[in-house]
Image (tube, helix red, strand yellow):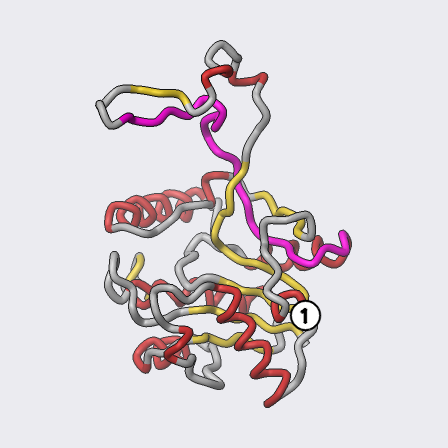
């Protein structure tokens, strides 16, 4: 069985009610649910939440809520891996043990169903334990600078000051959309950023963190442009 778990707790503080706040006309979580269903990859698409309103919205868009997330896994310090582990173990005990599991974030409106399918194929073909989305930094991280306490400039790696950008190694970061993995790997809570993972590379235009109101406004504008240009569905 293939299981999709969408974590969506109710206590977002920087953007209140973030998971169900309207984003270009739909609750934010609706984009993740619809992409998961459209991918055709899953026997079950479930939302792990502690919030009754989020649960109701998720159900209205086709997700299942077979359990409510425990309060111990619903605070600011609760990590993703324990939440997915809880969901997998619930299915082990109460329904059917899953083989492959996808953690799909509720705040990923740019996620595409085709990418979900292709990432599962990549996971299986490469025999990795995880496959998750990454994208490249737009600026070489080797030439990053910090602001000092005296409001001056300091390079993290001064030895790279005279290096040409094209001569520096490309660097990537987590795109924050989804994480495919073996069910047993999630239960063991193995870390994502390691040699057991294979990267599914996304173009930068399909990636946008949404942690602040400014991020939200930028993401809505990006989504509208990408949708009009046919870059996303």
Q: Position of residue 198 (x, y in %)?
A: 67, 49
Residue at the outermost front position: 149
Residue 205 visible in the snapshot: yes
Q: Where is residue 185 in the image (x, y as percent from the top left)?
A: 66, 65
Q: In which quarter of the image is residue 99?
A: bottom right
Q: Name the residue under label 1.
A: 184
Q: Which of 220 and 178 is in front in this view?
A: 178
Numbered marks: total: 1
Range covered by the magenta-colored residues = 126-148
- Asked if residue 114 lies in the magenta stretch, the reply is no
Q: Classify residue 70 as left or right of residue 126.
A: left
Residue 40 visible in the snapshot: no
- Asked if residue 129 lies in the magenta stretch, the reply is yes
Q: Where is residue 210 in the image (x, y as percent from the top left)?
A: 34, 51
Count residues near mark 1 (Cα–Cα under 10 Å), then give few for <14, some for 14-19, many for 20+.
some
Q: Where is residue 21 in the image (x, y as percent from the top left)?
A: 28, 64
Which residue is found at the position 53% from the left and 70% from the top?
A: 84
Which residue is found at the position 28% from the left and 26% from the top?
A: 148
* Vertical side of 75 occupied by 166: above or below: above
Which residue is found at the position 45% from the left and 63% from the top?
A: 79
Q: At numbered mark 1, what does the secondary structure look like: helix, strand or loop?
A: helix
Q: In which quarter of the image is residue 201?
A: top right
* Vertical side of 131 occupied by 187: above or below: below
């Amino acid at each position: 069985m293939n299981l999709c778990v969408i974590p969506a707790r109710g206590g977002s503080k920087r953007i209140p009610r973030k998971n169900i706040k309207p984003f270009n006309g739909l609750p934010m979580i609706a984009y993740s649910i619809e992409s998961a269903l459209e991918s055709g990859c899953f026997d079950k698409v479930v939302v792990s939440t502690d919030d009754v309103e989020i649960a109701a919205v998720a159900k209205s868009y086709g997700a299942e809520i077979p359990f409510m997330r425990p309060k111990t896994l619903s605070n600011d310090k609760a990590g993703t891996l324990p939440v997915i582990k809880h969901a997998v173990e619930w299915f082990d005990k109460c329904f059917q043990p899953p083989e492959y599991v996808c953690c799909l974030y509720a705040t990923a409106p740019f996620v595409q169903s085709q990418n979900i399918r292709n990432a599962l194929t990549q996971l299986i073909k490469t025999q990795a334990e995880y496959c998750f989305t990454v994208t490249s930094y737009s600026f070489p991280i080797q030439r990053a600078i910090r602001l000092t306490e005296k409001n001056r400039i300091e390079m993290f790696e001064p030895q790279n000051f005279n290096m040409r950008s094209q001569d520096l190694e490309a660097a990537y970061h987590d795109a924050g959309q989804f994480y495919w993995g073996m069910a047993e790997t999630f239960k063991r809570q193995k870390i994502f950023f390691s040699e057991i993972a294979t990267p599914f590379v996304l173009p930068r235009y399909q990636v946008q963190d949404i942690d602040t109101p400014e991020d939200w406004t930028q993401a809505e504008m990006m989504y509208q442009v990408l949708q009009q240009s046919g870059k996303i569905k």
